[in-house]
Amino acid sequence: MKTILYLGISLFGITSVFFMCSSSQDSTQKMSQMLQSIYQKNLAPDNPFAPIAALKLFDSILKQNLSDMDRMEIMFRRGFALLSLGREAESVQQLEFLSQRLSDPYDPSTIILMKKLAISYLRLGEKQNCVTNHTAESCLLPIRGTGIHKDQSNSRNAITILNKILEKEPMDFESRWVLNIAYMTVGEYPTQVPKKFLIPDLDKDPTEVNFKPFVDIAPMLGIISSNLAGGAITDDFNGDGFLDIVTSDWSLKGTMHIYINDGKGSFSDVSESSNLSKLTGGLNIMQTDYDNDGDLDIFVARGAWLNKYGEQPKSLLRNNGDLTFTDVTEECGLISLRPTQAAVWRDFNNDGWLDLFIGNEATPNTTDYPSQLFINNKKGHFTEVAEQAGCQLIDFIKGVTAGDYNNDGLEDIYISSLTGQQVLLKNMGVKNNIPVFQNVTHEAGLDDIKTKTFPTWFWDYNNDGWLDIFVCGYDFGKSIATTICMEEIGMEQNICQMHLYRNNKNGSFTNVSNEAGLKHAVYAMGANFGDVDNDGFLDMYLATGNPEFESLVPNRLFKNSADGKFTDVTVAARVGNLQKGHGVAISDMDNDGDQDIFVEIGGAFPGDFFHNSFYLNPGQNNNNWIQVLLEGNDSNKAAIGSRIKISISENGTKRDIYRDVNSGGSFGSSSLRKDIGLGSAAIIDELTITWQKSQKKEVFYNIPVNQRLKIKEGENKITKIELTPLRFFGDSTKIPMCKPAII
């Protein structure tokens, strides 16, 4: 096993003395300085996500004596670098200059230049209309209302170019998709789209499900900081019962943000005073309580997708209990430089303290970056034991999740990767305080897919008391826009599909994706699950995209139909953001009893930033609900891994609802407070808590619905939490739907 040691080793000119200061303020500042030093070292022309370095290189090359062909090639690359940097007008100027010097700019050999020119025009229009003048309907598919561009000149230039491209190359499905989107931005879809290039019904709801539209209130709340790709957490970081929001930005120039819910209908940005603004980078973030003090801490995963340039430290940020955070990575023994965005916190050795599994990214062209398992030593320190535990994998890991899939009281691990290798690690028990894992992928029937996958999670989608597995494909063929266009016009696609595995209750799983209606290409990155219509069955929201500017594909919301199938309600729900979607969190942010959706939006390049979305749930029906916050005593304080079973009766029919305490998917973190829909049940017949460490059960009977409860392990009592439903500033359409408890 390769280990990275810091004692006496210089890291990009920064030695380990960087972390020797005992001051908590200094430790955070030192990490900040370290990250900025790495950023400077990463400004290399061969780093595909450092366009500023590429631009400087191209400018220097253009000063040399070049052949006309070579000069045009460098100028083309320079034009794309300008687009990547967000200098769209200069990109357009550069590419227009080149197009005018081509004898036939629409010759098959030069069409790629015209496609980049078209997307530069379209992106310039997006910046002028959707970024600068952002509204609640900006970039929502179908684009309509205030989402239609006011300044349409750049979209119309893109339309002209794309139509000419398609006249020459009618089977260019990528251009056809972008053309239809461009027509939407000027309000002329579908009527003005040439019939031979039209993708029909993009503006229609393909279902007959009655689903009320969500409203993106992020612009009204002011939580629209412009981000690149990043993570999201919705949870209570100051202990007042109201859910706050934390975001990150994967660029080592982009800072973290924390927005505190003031309990009055607004949020306050306290990023600077909390110290989070000092910390940059992090494609994924998640909450934990590593020190069992009752305050939620934050883990930041950095370096994903960057190969050798992803050698960046993770961060563990301790919540000081006063709305400040301290970077304690070094003092906790978690320093390592391995690219990742995939991690999960669980008590793997059942000692009452949360441990950390990290799935790192290794490729054939880079140093091996094995996965890591850090066991919590209970004294503010961790020990890395992946090799001894049998979970030291070397793979391009993109998603990890944990859960007790065989109901034996031990936390197991499922791993998703870009190599097509999916892995289920069964926890066989604990030896010398170290959990021992066994690879049971084949025995479990989980080795049937061989394509790239990304986000994943354990969940009980069918409420049978056994955890199932969801994993989303990320193999999109020629391009994402090509694949979605072909699917929308009826050309069957067998790539980038969703995969749903139903637990057979005997240690094995069955792939039921097709039967569940999930045979769709969705290209999910960030994703999470929740019950947005309070029927007691888990739905899911998938945030889509990849770094390409052409990848303007909608995020997707799938409703669990309670019959083993899922229905796409994206259009009806008005949540299909076309910009790049990343961290997803689904929680009841306004305390009205239904779950809202927060999404970190933004691409990989500086020129592809966008605003976050906060989709407020209007209330889908009159279904009842319960919210349960657990606090461990013998188990870990956050009660992560503990299980909730609710028994109810609806119209004379008894059924059970199951939930695990966790933050949801592998890319985005929902609240650890469980928001649980109850359908039309008027009372909870039985509420059973199974505590993670001991597997002991506490049972409560005849619980009124539509209230918030807190249950502490071992006390055998319920405490009711009184929280007033919020009317968020600017939310003129929402009437609080919190019902009084039925006694």
Image (cartoon, rainbow, N blue to C red):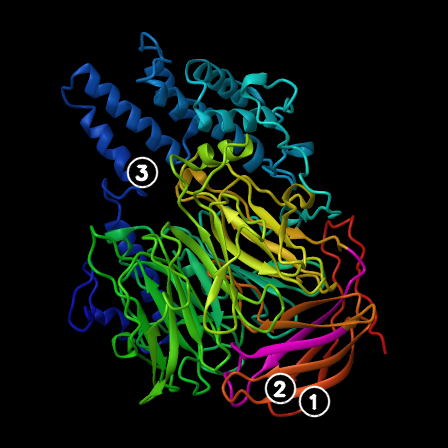
Task: Give the answer, above or below, for where 698 lies relative to 332.
Answer: below
Q: Tell me, yes or no, if residue 28 can be seen here.
A: no
Q: Position of residue 349 (x, y in %)?
A: 40, 84
- Front disc: 1 or 3: 1
Question: What type is the residue that disc 2 sits on?
Answer: Lys
Dots 2, 1 in contact, CB < 8 A? yes
* Residue located beneath label 3 in the image: 51
Q: Quadrant of the C terminus?
A: bottom right
Give how far apart the Cα atoms at labels 3 and 2 are.
52 Å
Mark 3, other Cα within 10 Å: few <14 / some 14–19 / many ≥20? many
Question: What type is the residue that disc 1 sits on?
Answer: Lys
Q: Position of residue 356 (x, y in %)?
A: 39, 73
* Residue located beneath label 2 in the image: 712
Task: Give the answer, above or below, for where 617 lies relative to 60.
Answer: below
- Label 3 sits on a secondary structure element that is helix
Most extreme residue toward the top is: 103
Q: Tell me, yes or no, if residue 615 can be seen here.
A: yes
Give how far apart the Cα atoms at labels 1 and 3 are.
58 Å
Which label number is shown at residue 666? Answer: none
Where are the magenta residues, as a range?
621-648
Report if residue 632 lies within the magenta region.
yes
- Front disc: 3 or 2: 2
Question: What type is the residue that disc 3 sits on?
Answer: Pro
Ranked by sequence position, the earlier of labels 2 and 1 is 2
Q: Is residue 377 left or right of residue 248?
A: left
The image quadrant that residue 19 belongs to is bottom left
Ranked by sequence position, the earlier of labels 1 and 3 is 3
Pick whichever, 584 or 412, lies toward us: 412
Which label number is shown at residue 717? Answer: 1
Dots 1, 3 in contact, CB < 8 A? no
